[in-house]
Image: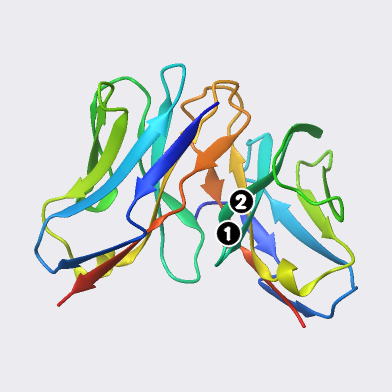
Amino acid sequence: DSGVTQTPKHLITATGQRVTLRCSPRSGDLSVYWYQQSLDQGLQFLIQYYNGEERAKGNILERFSAQQFPDLHSELNLSSLELGDSALYFCASSPQGGQGNEQFFGPGTRLTVL
Amino acid sequence: AQSVTQLGSHVSVSEGALVLLRCNYSSSVPPYLFWYVQYPNQGLQLLLKYTSAATLVKGINGFEAEFKKSETSFHLTKPSAHMSDAAEYFCAVRSNTGNQFYFGTGTSLTVIP
């Protein structure tokens, strides 16, 4: 158990819909990262937040957005969903500072778009 | 910019044989390198990390990796494969700003009984 929690574990929805994925980082970790893992594109970095502020952006679509709240939990919002958005979405957290610090991954949310 | 390349998307070894998973990095500054393992339907779990303290890094489950600057490599090895080692393995490098991790495309390890 990494200490990072993600809800829901599974999500099935239809094209055009909007969903929200939730992540709670490890206690004390200020950084939260979101990743998308699909069979054809591997593990893709989406976005990073640090103590409520966006710090880095990766291959995140404009239809996707994220935020980190004062209690440090984060939400990833996916809208106008397409079939190709079906994937595993991982959240990871990392302690503040120290480039040698690793990321701790949550168990993921499996999104299926029908 | 940092990046990692994992050679071989699929590796098969016999139970008890040496495991060697290859990772080469590209970094303009001394890197921080990581190996993660992902078991089916689970998140990624840290195996080991290199943070410049020692070139030979020992991790969990009998895995180790050696940082070779001259070869820009950080290959993962295990002397004797177990069936439980079957999983997906990812090499990663952390950016020098600390804001982003760059993951390789992963290597799927199959252990043949």
Q: Do callouts 1 and 2 point to residues on the same chain?
A: yes
Circle 1: residue type: Gln
Label 2 neighbour load within 10 Å: few <14, some 14-19, many 20+ = many
Left or right: A73 as drawn, with respect to A110 = right
Foreground residue, A2 or A58?
A58
Q: Residue at x 27, y 69 (%)?
A: B110
Foreground residue, A4 or A102?
A102
Q: Residue at x 58, y 32 (%)?
A: A95
Mark sitting on residue A41: 1
Circle 2: residue type: Gln
Gap in angstroms between the C-alphas marked 1 and 2: 7 Å
Outermost top residue: B29
Residue A56: % across, % down = 72, 33
The chain ID associated with circle 1 is A
Left or right: A47 as drawn, with respect to B101 = right
Outermost bottom residue: A114
Label 1 neighbour load within 10 Å: few <14, some 14-19, many 20+ = few
Is disc 2 placed on a helix, strand or loop?
strand
- In the picture shown, does residue A102 fall above or below A34? above
Foreground residue, A2 or A37?
A37
Foreground residue, B70 or B102?
B70
- Quarter holding residue A30: top right
Is disc 1 placed on a helix, strand or loop?
loop
- Quarter holding residue A97: top right
Q: Quadrant of the C terminus of chain A?
A: bottom right
Q: Residue at x 22, y 70 (%)?
A: B111
Q: Are marks 1 and 2 in contact (CB under 8 Å)?
A: yes
- In the picture shown, does residue B59 fall above or below A55? below
Residue B58: % across, % down = 23, 38
- In the picture shown, does residue B43 fall above or below B20? below
Q: Which residue is mark 2?
A: A44
